[in-house]
Image: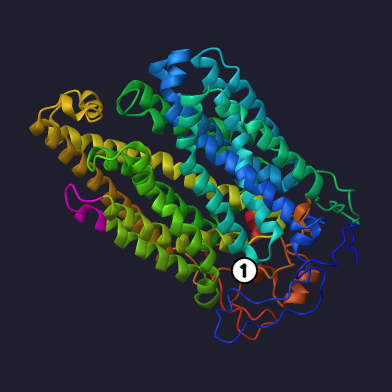
Amino acid sequence: MYDSSGVRTTGFRGAGRTGPAAPGRQGRDPEVSETTPRRTAAAAVTPHGRGPVVAALMLVMALSALDGTVVSTAVPQIVGDLGGLSVFSWLFSGYLLAVTVTLPVYGKLCDTFGRKPVLVAGTVLFLIGSLLCATAWNMASLIAFRVVQGLGGGALQGTVQTIAADLYPLKERPRIQARLSTVWATASVAGPAAGGLLAGYGDWRWIFLLNLPVGLLALWLIGRHLVEPGRPSAVGGGPGAAARPAVDWPGALAVFATGALLLTALVQGGVAWPWLSAPSLGLFGGALVLGAVTVLVERRATEPIIPGWIWRRRTIVTVNLALGALGLLMVAPTVFLPTYAQAVLGLGPIAAGFVLSAMTLSWPVTAALSNRVYGRIGFRLTAVIGITLALLVLLAFPFLPFPGEPWQPALLMLLLGGALGFFQLPLIVGVQSTVPYGERGTTTASVLFCRQVGQSVGAALFGAVANAVLAARLGSGDLDGLARALDAPGSLAAGTADALRRAVDAAVDHVFTGAAAAAALALLVLLTVAPRRFPVLPDGDDHPESPSRTGTSRTTPTRSALRRTGTSRADASGTGPSRTGGSPTGRTREDTSPTAAPRNEADRA
């Protein structure tokens, strides 16, 4: 049979069926109800099957992850060809800045124009940036083209996660998210090795040219197999007749400018200039002023890029803060562990990468299995267990012996990956499941944005901590010169080399202690801010053709949906009276915070 948008629904697991939601299985937490979906987003989004679309999402995710790390090992060849040693760090910073500041904008555009046009436009822009990077004639042009890449890359990350949530009902989302996590982790770890091979045995320009066939294949799969439903009209509900809401371009510009100034201050502070210097203070001051301007612009916008409800709903606030803390703590293993492995353990770059890659082995496994846990005890408690285990692992790192064996930090990374798999995925799946289709893009983007900002803050904060420890242990000499000497230990006296290794060991120990503090902060947020139960919407109540995608009632569930689930509008927003086990959806008490505004009020703010 066919739905109202002309999409065939027969043949999709869980699609096209009607009827009341089935009660949860005995012994399972009612927060994650075993509903029979009345109408899943998968049936509405892709009539040709989910396989080709998932393949395209994995290709796009791999591109985004690879280009964040692939350049690192090719820097010597790039600098030797183009020059610009003093500014080469902007090859990474420019890309990171562009990706981060565009995430909220693309999230809102996903909810306004649909996922497919945003993903296609972002992929095309990313490929144009890749082609331009391959034609760069000096370091300045390469940095500028990396920014173009990042402007497209911001669309890739958030949109892929949003489409994945659209394709799969709640019960199946951990599977696709685990696949995407595996692709991201594998591509991130393989990036430096691939970049080194291409630069060493070919030409560094191939690093960017190889993006083209992969991206074009992903575009072909998306164009052929990803079909979004027609938009309902604002009055009659007919497909394709709705006027699209106006885009808040002033708000987008304000968000972009604020994020650019803030992240530039965080990334370059303590590196290009001292923290208390005029450039640093000027950037932070400018970010503060522009942040105030952004708030004023967004409060007056009809369709704000960052709606007020993002920071009024306890569930979204919880996940934003928790994932921000995750981004902060991840700086310790991803940035400082390779330095520890090479400087303290004496490993080469490839072997040091294998120590870190142990984390990528366990993370996808526990992420895929997390649904068995949160299906019984809920999203919040599952995340609490995961971050508690991560806290213990991070606290164990400073107790490793000096100099130790490579298997010891590798074992800790294996345990850390397993713990974080139980932490991140339940939060992402949980928060995506509390919002309807028309809010999922904005919500997902806000979560990823907070994680990216956390990484930037962590890099700046932990970099300052490490430098302070090194300076205290080694004096105020040329730390960069001593660090470079580690690559040639024969050039140093035995006592000097040992002192430097011990200083690096102490610095990394302090960084991991700081990462443990970030984990403790995430745990505190989950225990004090998070609602006891996430207000999960039943599968099918977030249908893409509901009025939540129009400009009139875009965020409030339809009356028919509320009648089917037996809840009020306040209940559906997760802020009204409690739901009991006797409700038709089989859900228990959820978010009853008196401070969380109902969705219709939050959207007007």
Q: Is the residue 227 above or below the residue 292 in the image? A: below
In this rendering, would 82 be left or right of 597?
Answer: left
Q: Is the residue 251 above or below the residue 409 in the image? A: above
Instruction: Give residue 84's quadrant in the image.
Output: top left
Q: Position of residue 461 (x, y in %)?
A: 32, 40
- Residue position marked by numbered label 1 in the rendering: 536
Q: How many marks?
A: 1
Instruction: Give residue 352's quadrant in the image.
Output: top left
**Circle 1: residue type:** Val
Q: Nearer the viewer, residue 90 or 417?
A: 417
401 magenta-colored: yes
At a point 48% along the width and 41% down the height, the residue shown is 190
Q: Position of residue 353 (x, y in %)?
A: 38, 43
At a point 16% along the width and 34% down the height, the residue shown is 500
Q: Position of residue 463 (x, y in %)?
A: 30, 37
Figure coloring: rainbow
The span shown in magenta is 396-405
424 magenta-colored: no
Extreme left residue here? 495
At a point 45% along the width and 65% down the height, the residue shown is 383
